[in-house]
Image (cartoon, rainbow, N blue to C red):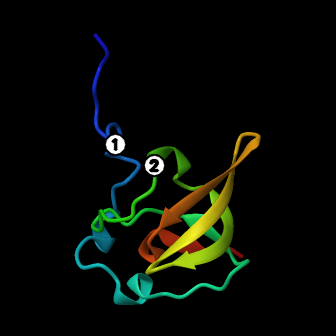
Amino acid sequence: MQHHHSFGRGTRQKFSKHHRTKGKISIRNFFQEFKIGERVTLKVEPAYHKARYYPRFHGKSGLITEKRGDCYSILIKDGEKDKMIITHPVHLQRSE
């Protein structure tokens, strides 16, 4: 029989915060705005579960293609394929 497991299985270290940053979510990060074509890095906010992406894409960077409601659509490269991820801005960081 096939093993059944949840979406966040095996992400205790990957999605955990440093002990100094634990607590309330930063309002600045929650309401941050991005422009289309801007480069961002996927960095999960563990305290906010909505609009979280698949754990394999943690740490990847991509380009913002459009805004969908409160969230953004990001185009990333996964191996040879281009993939589109829709996530909340609290899970995004600007790349330089």
Could you say which disc has been placed on residue 7 in the image? 1
Between the C-alphas of marks 1 and 2, the distance is 7 Å
Whether residue 20 sits left or right of residue 39 in the image: it is: left
On the image, numbered disc 2 is attached to which residue?
54
Q: Residue at x 32, y 65 (%)?
A: 50
Residue at the (51%, 44%) spot, across then down? 56
Q: Looking at the image, which residue sits at the far right?
A: 80
Question: Which quadrant is the C terminus positioned in?
Answer: bottom right
Name the residue at 30% across, 79% down: 25
Looking at the image, residue 55 sits to the left or right of residue 50; the answer is right
Q: Position of residue 21 (x, y in %)?
A: 32, 73
What is the x, y in percent for residue 82?
71, 50
Contact (CB < 8 A) between labels 1 and 2? yes
Secondary structure of the residue carrying numbered label 2: loop
Residue 28 location, x and y as percent? 41, 89
Instruction: Say what amino acid the circle numbered 1 marks.
Output: Phe
Is residue 29 found left or right of 83 in the rendered image?
left
Query: Please, what secondary structure does the residue beneath circle 1 have?
Result: loop
Q: Quadrant of residue 73?
A: bottom right
Judging depth in this view, the residue of 93 and 71 nearest the camera is: 71
Percent of width and height locating residue 24:
24, 79
First-in-chain label (1 vs 2): 1
Up the image or down, 58 lies above or below 11; here it is below
**How many numbered circles does the render carry?**
2
Q: Amino acid at mark 2?
A: Tyr
Determine the image quadrant of residue 19. bottom left
Q: Nearer the viewer, residue 17 or 83?
A: 83
Compared with 20, 49 (above or below) is above
Q: Residue at x 33, y 44 (%)?
A: 8
**Mark 2 packing: few (<14 Cα in 10 Å), some, or many (20+)?**
few
Considering every residue shown, the one lying at the far front of the view is 69
- Crowdedness of circle 1 by 10 Å Cα count: few (<14), some, many (20+)? few
